[in-house]
Amino acid sequence: MSAFLQALSFWDWLALGTVLLIFEVFGAGGYLLWIGLAAICVGVLAFLVPSLAWEVQLLLFGLLSLLTALYWWRRQRSAIRASDQPNLNLRGRELIGKTFVVHQAIVNGRGRIKVADGVWIAKGADAPEGARVRVVGQEGAILLVENLD
């Protein structure tokens, strides 16, 4: 192993960088892109300075890999922004505060309410069919309601 490390050339770094870039194509989320570019940078540096010791090459590769991965992570975190539709795909939350009609009487705290073209399970005080209720919360797929009548 030490013979390989002592004979480490710029071709080895370029090959490693190419392999990492190929793996990135298969969906690594951007991290292998930056590590592959770090390997290519070390390969270019090894070409420009042929007397560069293998220890320095490995240290540079590790440092550049760490710095580029950190850069990518920070860039990804800063790209996250608040949605202008925070309740998208949270249908129950967007129903809170709205008024609906009881579709199936609420008996012993459970029944069904009509929401647009669908029916949701409702939990709340007993209410007859046709009564108006307001959604005040949500427990999973069950809407918590209060009577308006």
Image (cartoon, helix red, strand yellow):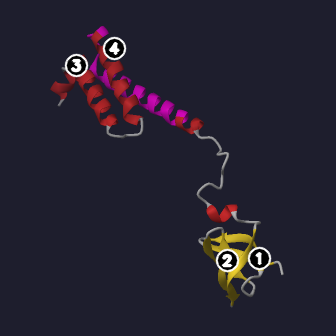
User: Do the numbered discs 1 and 4 sit on residues whose CB atoms are within 8 Å?
Assistant: no
Foreground: 103 or 74? Answer: 103
- Determine whether the residue tagged by mark 2 lies in a helix, strand or loop: strand
Q: Nearer the viewer, residue 67 or 146?
A: 146
- At label 4, the amino acid type is Leu
**What range is drawn magenta here?**
48-75
Residue 50 image position (x, y, % from top left)? 26, 10
Q: Which residue is mark 4?
A: 45
Which residue bears the numbered disc 3? 11
| Distance of label 1 from label 4 (alpha carbons) | 71 Å
Tell me which label, 2 or 4, sits earlier in the chain.
4
Q: Quadrant of the N terminus?
A: top left
Q: Which residue is mark 2?
A: 113
What residue is shown at x 61% (from left), y 60% (from top)? 90
Badge nearest the viewer, 3 or 2: 2
Disc 1 to disc 2: CB gap under 8 Å: yes
Q: In the image, what residue type sits under mark 1?
A: Val
Q: Separation of disc 3 and disc 2 at Cα?
A: 69 Å
Q: Amino acid at mark 2?
A: Ile
Indicate which disc, 1 or 4, sits on the residue closer to the N terminus: 4
Q: Which residue is mark 1?
A: 133
Which of the marked residues, 1 or 2, is nearer the chain's N terminus?
A: 2
| Residue type, mark 3 in image | Trp
| Direction bottom: furthest residue | 108
